[in-house]
Amino acid sequence: MNQERVYTVLQAPHISEKVSNLGDSSNQYAFKVERDATKAEIKEAVEMIFGVAVTNVTTANVRGKVKRSRWRAARRRNWKKAYVRIAAGQEIDYMVTE
């Protein structure tokens, strides 16, 4: 995978209460990723950017919510979420990237 693709596969970390509990219990982190990204690309991107060993990647397609306003209903975009499990004893710091 080329260097440009590595930095476009991962869009943002997904932080929620569920993900925080997964991080504490089973060393998993969640990321918002490109909709066409494969598990192999996600694994390679996380290993290259954060310098950790990835043991498992699980993906989920998330449907966009329908938001209603006073005048009309609009739908948010669909997106893809990746749960990444890293090796024991390692952790990801979202604020510091090398």
Image (cartoon, rainbow, N blue to C red):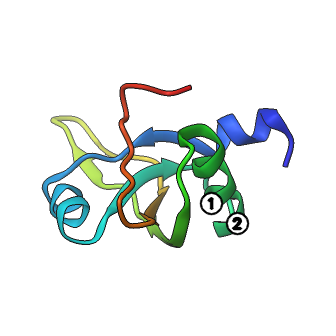
Return the residue nearer the eye: 68 or 38.
Answer: 38
- x and y percentages locating residue 62 in the rendered image: 41, 63
Q: Is residue 18 above or below residue 31?
A: below
Q: Quadrant of residue 42?
A: bottom right
- x and y percentages locating residue 46 in the rendered image: 57, 49
Determine the secondary structure under disc 1.
Answer: helix
Q: Quadrant of residue 41?
A: bottom right
Return the residue nearer the eye: 91 or 35.
Answer: 91
Which residue lies most toward the front here? 89
Residue at the image position 66 percent from the left and 44 percent from the top: 48
Residue at the image position 53 percent from the left and 72 percent from the top: 55
Check disc 2 and give the amino acid type: Ala
Determine the secondary structure under disc 2.
Answer: helix
Residue 45 located left or right of residue 15: right
Mark 1 packing: few (<14 Cα in 10 Å), some, or many (20+)? many
Return the residue nearer the eye: 42 or 27.
Answer: 27
- x and y percentages locating residue 61 in the rendered image: 48, 67
Give residue 40's mark. Answer: 2
Which residue lies most toward the right here? 2
Q: CA gap, disc 1 to disc 2?
A: 5 Å
